Amino acid sequence: MTMTEYFPIIPLGGGTTEIEAFGSLFCRMAIAHSVSVYALTTHLRTWWGHKNPEDASAKKNVTNSMNPMLCGIGPNVATYVNIVTSATGCAELNRTTLLSLSPAICSSGHQLVRKGRAWCPACMDESQKGEHPFYDRLIWAVTAVKRCHAHRIALESSCPHCGHFQAHYHHLGQMLLCYVCKKPLVSPSASWKVMLHPPLYEKECLNLVGDISAGRIFNVAENAYGIFINEFADYLIPMDLKISRHAYRTSRRPQTSREATKPRFSTLLRRCAAFGVEPSAIFLDPVGAAKSACLLEFARLDLPHELKPRKSVHLVQLSSVSLHSRLAENEYDRLPSLVEIARDLGVSKGFLNYHHHDLCTTYARHRTRCRNRKVANQIKCAVAYLHDGLIAQYPSANFPSHDHLVAAVVCEFGIAVRVARIAVGVALRKQLGKRAYERYRKASSLDVTNPVNRSPGSLMSST
Ligand SMILES: [Zn+2]
Ligand SMILES: [Zn+2]
């Protein structure tokens, strides 16, 4: 039995940077069911255990979690999001966490989310005065975020009465109460700390949470940062530059290890700032992010204008594979031109010719050969068709001229007019004999009153 019947629960602030944190949603669930957070967890674990007896992942109790807001990238978060998604039927719970980033950042994600709770005292105060319920925001759990960007007030983490750091939620899920002394957490406005200037990386984190909340970040590539670094390094090679020497100062590490290891979130933020790209961009489109980072480098370096960004080595290999695979094809219709192949790969024909000169020549010859074979086949079919009847009647009332025969062939086979004309010529020559055909051709080419007849004659002479 699912809980959807009693309790349709969806994250508050969905689609905006103000989206609820998963732990907060969990507390609201406990309140709605009039049970403690502990009881809800136990109940859900038992329910899950009956449903999936082979799954042992739900052993830990989330009420003991280091980050009560439960919105990091750890296995606990993934397990509970999975269970609650299954119980409530709400498919968007993933967005109340940073789980969608997990493929691309270091799994021991220190410094991604803070330990304990954090909240904006002004937001808390407002919701106590007004009608709207208070909830913990996902953005407040991110360590790099130090203040509420709406109120420009520093986030708080301790009870104003007993001074205890809020490492857990109140046992009944009452987010406005201290989990130790059970008194209200709301503090007098005189004690609020104003932070007028945005702390470092606040904007980046807001954009990232906004993108997660709107469902824009999903299916992040396993090695998104590695792809970015790899692409970026490729662009820098022609300038004889290396990333480590160039964009930021750090101890020398081999390029490959930097590509292979996932960065920590804080490292990612720092490097993104150094490269001038948004962290969101790396998660969404690492190749595109490398391109824009490179453009920024080029602008910064004031390079001679002839120097163009080099296409990636990967693209050179890809184009070789693409040309090679097409050489196996013998059907002309399945052989695109070099220009079309280049367009598919996002390069120019010149790029293909430059990197694979011999292969391009071979391919072009192969394509011509296949085209000739195809035309020869078409002519053969058309000639056979003409000999089956039309030529015997020619010239007749139905087919008074050469062009009427051509039209009939085009209509029958759907081939090009140029090919049809050749076919008609071949068929006539066969029917009339070579000498008689020459005479016929000469007569029709002298017949200036009928210019239509001139073209097949002139065309025949050129072939
Ligand atoms: Zn606020
Ligand atoms: Zn307290």
Image: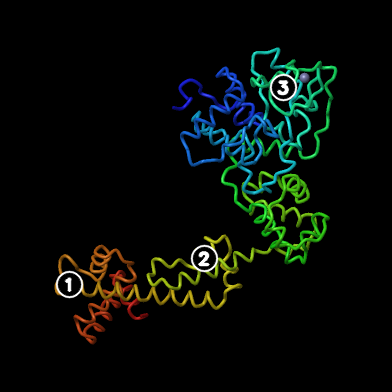
**Who's the residue at 45% across and 66% down the image?**
336
Q: Can residue 156 be seen from the camera position used here?
A: no
Earlier sequence position, callout 3 versus callout 1? 3
The residue that label 1 is drawn on is 395
Which image quadrant is residue 314 in?
Answer: bottom right
The residue that label 2 is drawn on is 339
Question: Is 114 positioned to the left or the right of 51 in the image?
Answer: right
**Foreground residue among 190 and 164:** 164
Element class at badge 1: loop
Mark 3 Cβ and ligand 2 under 8 Å apart: yes
Type of amino acid at the residue the image marks with label 3: Tyr
Earlier sequence position, callout 2 versus callout 3? 3
Distance from label 3 to label 1 (Cα)?
104 Å
Type of amino acid at the residue the image marks with label 2: Val
**Quarter of the displayed picture in which ligand 1 can be seen:** top right
Element class at badge 2: helix
**Who's the residue at 48% across and 25% down the image?**
3
Type of amino acid at the residue the image marks with label 1: Pro
